[in-house]
Image (cartoon, helix red, strand yellow):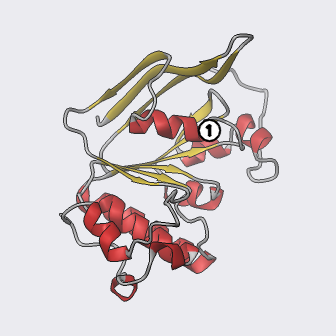
């Protein structure tokens, strides 16, 4: 097991109130698996990513990580100073010496400034940077933003290839439910707490999924049986 979250919570206290952003989050991340986190806007997905990256600490519960765990991260947006021009080559060199072949060929972009790249070009560069050092866990926050439909399919194929070739655990924050239900091993549906989690087939049938994403999954529930779980 690479990462284990046990009853993790995160809240922000002000003088007048406490805002609970995440409550009682528990799940495990294993090698050679894709875990996708879905949920409506404002559900706490970005906060969860920050907790996984160690940028903030939980206010309750515990996050356990395998010793010497290496993390790779592809942000939703690159927050770089536009007044400090940086070429793709310089950016990638700052990320370290490559331990694996880059998933995307960006040699034609190598002399370009990071700020002049299109959305799709930038995502390829960021993806290459995140996997250079062969991470154990790759965290992707909406990695296909600014990428067209064909590009999305290629991106997701690369993610699956990396997982299988290098035994990487992938944690993916995504709005792309079609990918979630096609390629993911484990889905976590988040809305400040874990609404439901499990395999895509299991998630598709839950009333929580239907309520959060109306019309996507057909929810059928017959009351001629008893629940045992």
- Residue shown at the point (56%, 65%) measured from the top left: 144
**Residue placed most toward the observer, 54 or 64:** 54
Which residue is pictured at 29% across the width and 72% down the height? 102
Residue marked by disc 1? 189
How far across and down, in percent of the image, does residue 108 sit? 37, 89
Can you name the residue that lies furthest to the bottom here? 108
Visible residue check, residue 229: no
Give the residue drawn at x 57%, y 80%.
150
Taking the image as shown, residue 161 lies to the left or right of residue 155, namely: left
Return the residue nearer the eye: 184 or 130: 130
Q: Secondary structure at mark 1?
A: strand
In the image, residue 47 sits, relative to residue 82, either above or below, namely above
Residue 136 to residue 165: above or below:
above
Image location (x, y in percent) of residue 93: 26, 67
Mark 1 crowdedness (10 Å alpha carbons): few <14, some 14-19, many ≥20 = many
Is 208 located above or below residue 129 in the figure?
Answer: above
Q: Residue furthest front?
A: 83
Question: Which quarter of the rendered picture does the C terminus lie within?
Answer: top right
Q: Residue at x 45, y 66 (%)?
A: 84
Q: Nearer the viewer, residue 202 or 224?
A: 202
Count every numbered label the image shows and give the total.
1
x, y percent for residue 36? 52, 47
Question: Looking at the image, is 158 positioned above or below residue 42?
Answer: below
Residue 101 in percent (x, y) is at 23, 72
Residue 111 appears in the figure? yes
Q: Quick one: quadrant of the N terminus?
A: top left
Q: Quadrant of residue 99?
A: bottom left
Q: Quadrant location of residue 193?
A: top right
């Amino acid at each position: 097991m690479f990462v284990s979250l046990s009853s993790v919570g995160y809240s922000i206290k002000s003088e007048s109130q406490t805002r609970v952003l995440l409550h009682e989050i528990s799940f495990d991340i294993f090698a050679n698996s894709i875990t996708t986190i879905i949920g409506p806007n404002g559900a706490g997905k970005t906060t969860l990513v920050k907790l996984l990256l160690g940028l903030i600490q939980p206010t309750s519960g515990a996050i356990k990580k395998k010793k010497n765990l290496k993390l790779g991260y592809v942000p939703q947006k690159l927050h770089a100073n536009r007044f400090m021009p940086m070429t793709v080559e310089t950016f990638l060199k700052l990320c370290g010496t490559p331990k694996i072949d880059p998933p995307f060929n960006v040699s034609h972009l190598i002399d370009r400034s990071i700020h002049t790249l299109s959305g799709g070009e930038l995502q390829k560069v960021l993806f290459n940077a995140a996997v250079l050092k062969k991470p154990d866990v790759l965290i992707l926050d909406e990695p296909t933003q600014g990428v067209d439909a064909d590009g999305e399919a290629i991106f997701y194929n690369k993610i699956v290839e990396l997982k299988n070739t290098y035994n990487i655990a992938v944690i993916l924050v995504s709005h792309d439910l079609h990918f979630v239900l096609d390629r993911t091993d484990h889905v976590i549906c988040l809305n400040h707490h874990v609404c439901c989690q499990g395999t895509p087939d299991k998630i598709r049938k839950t009333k929580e999924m239907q309520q959060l994403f109306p019309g996507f999954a057909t929810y059928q529930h017959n009351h001629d049986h008893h629940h045992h779980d």
